[in-house]
Amino acid sequence: MLGEIKGLNEECGVFALWGHKEAAQLSYYGLHSLQHRGQEGAGIVVSDEEHLHIHKGLGLVNDAFKEGDLEALEGHASLGHVRYATAGGGGLDNCQPLMFRSQTDSLAIAHNGNLVNAHNLKLELEDQGSIFQSTSDTEVIAHLIKRSVYPRMEDKLSDALSMVEGAYALAVMTEGKLLIAQDPHGLRPLSIGKLGGAYVVASETCAFDVIGAEYEREVQPGEIITFDRNGMRSELYATPAERRMCSMEYVYFSRPDSNIDQINVHTARKNLGKKLAAEAPIEADIVTGVPDSSISAAIGYAEEAGIPYEMGMIKNRYVGRTFIQPSQELREQGVKMKLSPVRGVVEGKRVVMVDDSIVRGTTSRRIVTMLKQAGAAEVHVRISSPPITHPCFYGIDTSTKSELIAATHSLEEMREEMGADSLSFISIDGMLDGIGRQDKDSNCGQCLACFTGNYPTDIYEDTLHPHDKVING
């Protein structure tokens, strides 16, 4: 639930390999590089051309895989996944890849994104006799594949995807094939690389770097790509719609060393900071960023404004998730454990605090309070994304508009709520210019739904939170 989170969270990351004898071991390293996309569970399926073998577990990649687990996964092809629980809920049953065995063959499936018509499809499938083993919408695609009457796997997948709506960067593996697909809008990133003669697929290009793979290209909207004994081949299963890459991939989710559509994420964020400084200047002594995703934007802001960038906050990387927070006092303590102001840097200074986004406003308020308690004379908050006023239904856990502070408060009310001396967000045009995509489509090929409420797909009534149905009228 949104009320339990400290900020935005991405649903998951996908990593797959075809044609390498150490597929499982390389997938393990690939999943490590995608750990920021999901910390609830991890799994790897391998194929030895005759059978699929799986191991998955809860927690971080290191928690899910113990000594000896990878050695048991022998095969030339692998499909891996890290997950953050959003719409589907938690638990091992929902950890991906999901695997299904039948009398004729086996199927493993993993995806990044969210299906907006999953609920309706589940009801139809259950009426026809399907039994679901998880609450993940990914399982809907598996049932649709199995029910397809086409003999060829590519046609089965195409048939299934013709019935789903939403965001999906998808990977499906059988004993003899690895198939990947991108939704018609291309809402989630998915790239292809090469490692010698092997093919690599990942949600982010940083996963290629860690195993020494070379980037080849992006998976295109509406495309299915097959890897098998005959190599790699591509076909379209749907007419590509206007590209709508998630803006928050550039702003927040992706690692700064990743490239999305050949745009470096760090460079994009730095440019966002420069645009923000031009749009919302302020007299100050230092600029600092909220670690880690806001540091690039803070550096850009400082450069453009001519104000020194300083490390005003330190992130403690060795603090795990805080599951028990029975009081407000302990919740505040949990934030202090994870983030600490540097008193010697901020004391007596007018501070520009750059952050990437504001969801509920609670974390921003706590950080402003910490900086002022550390002696900051003024704290000016600058946000490198526009106000998030609408929920995302494509794999980010902002599913309730009623708890988005920018949807229910004015700019001045938000400033007062967090105790800042000033508050400014980058404009939508500033964000588009800063990221620098050259798509000829409207909105530079980016999804702006969480800022504007203009969704690239239909949104079904059952996807809305009850509170939002009242807000939306």
Image (cartoon, rainbow, N blue to C red):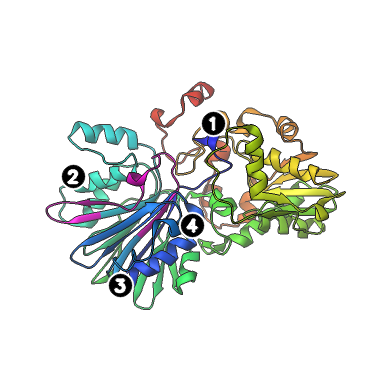
- SS category of the residue bearing label 4: helix
Residue 407 placement, left or right of 229 = right
Q: Earlier in the sequence, mark 4 or mark 3?
A: 3
| Residue nearest the viewer, comparing 348 with 37 | 348
Q: Earlier in the sequence, mark 1 or mark 4?
A: 4
Mark 2 belongs to which amino acid?
Arg
| Residue 414 seen | yes
> Mark 1 against mark 4, which lies toward the viewer?
4
Q: Which of marks 1 and 3 is nearer the N terminus?
A: 3
Mark 1 belongs to which amino acid?
Lys
> Mark 2 against mark 3, which lies toward the viewer?
3
- SS category of the residue bearing label 1: helix
Q: Measure the alpha-carbon separation of dots 2 and 1.
A: 36 Å
Mark 3 belongs to which amino acid?
Gly
Q: Measure the alpha-carbon separation of dots 1 and 4.
A: 27 Å
Q: Give the range drawn in magenta.
A: 80-107
Vertical arrangement, residue 362 with respect to residue 110, above or below? above
Residue 33 in the image: state x and y as whole percent.
Answer: 49, 62
Q: Measure the alpha-carbon separation of dots 2 and 3.
A: 29 Å
